Image (cartoon, rainbow, N blue to C red):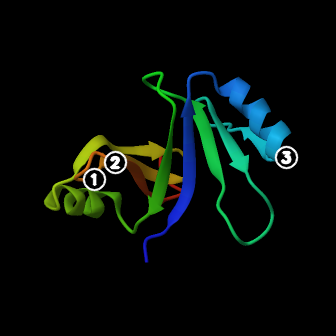
């Protein structure tokens, strides 16, 4: 089953949101050491729930994007388009993690989908 494995919050001023969520919910938020400004959010140590990330919104809008784990970003890009969806950000690497893409469903709902690949560059 393809599950939501990550959430991503996109905001105009990430540093403000980092402090907000740390102070309000006690989440551990750490700057990712990858090539992009991105903060990893650890929501807890229990088995239930998921962790996420925080980044500067590319268009200044505030949104949350759910990321779904799939076996192959390429295969699911084809499936999405075959069902009338639209790829809005094609497959791109997350160095050392895997590949991710973003799409709209038939109603314009934005979501991401990814597969693991530690060799991604």
Q: Residue at x 67, y 65 (%)?
A: 49
Tell me if I can see residue 96 in this picture: no
Residue 26 is marked as 3
Look at mark 2 in the image and give the residue it sits on.
109
User: Taking 77 as reference, is 37 above or below it?
Assistant: above
Nearest the eye: 94 or 82: 82
Residue 2 drawn above or below residue 28? below
For mark 3, give the secondary structure: loop
Name the residue rendered at 34%, 58% in the picture.
73
- Residue 32: image x %, image y %? 68, 38
Sooner in the amino-acid sequence: mark 3 or mark 1:
3
Whether the residues at callouts 3 and 1 have beta carbons within 8 Å, the answer is: no
Residues at circles 1 and 2 in contact by the CB criterion of under 8 Å: yes
Q: Earlier in the sequence, mark 3 or mark 2?
A: 3
Is disc 2 placed on a helix, strand or loop?
A: loop
The residue that label 1 is drawn on is 105
Residue at point 68%, 36% (across, down): 33
The answer to whether residue 12 is left or right of residue 70 is right
């Amino acid at each position: 089953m393809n599950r939501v494995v990550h959430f991503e919050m996109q905001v105009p001023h990430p540093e403000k949101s980092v402090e907000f969520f740390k102070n309000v919910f006690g989440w551990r938020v750490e700057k990712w050491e990858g090539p992009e400004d991105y903060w990893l959010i650890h929501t807890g140590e229990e088995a239930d729930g998921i962790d996420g990330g925080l980044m500067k919104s590319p268009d200044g809008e505030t949104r949350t994007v759910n990321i779904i784990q799939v076996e192959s970003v390429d295969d699911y890009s084809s499936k999405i388009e075959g069902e009338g969806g639209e790829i809005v950000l094609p497959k791109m690497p997350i160095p050392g993690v895997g590949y991710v893409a973003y799409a709209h469903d038939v109603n314009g709902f934005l979501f991401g989908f990814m597969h693991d690949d530690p060799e991604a560059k």
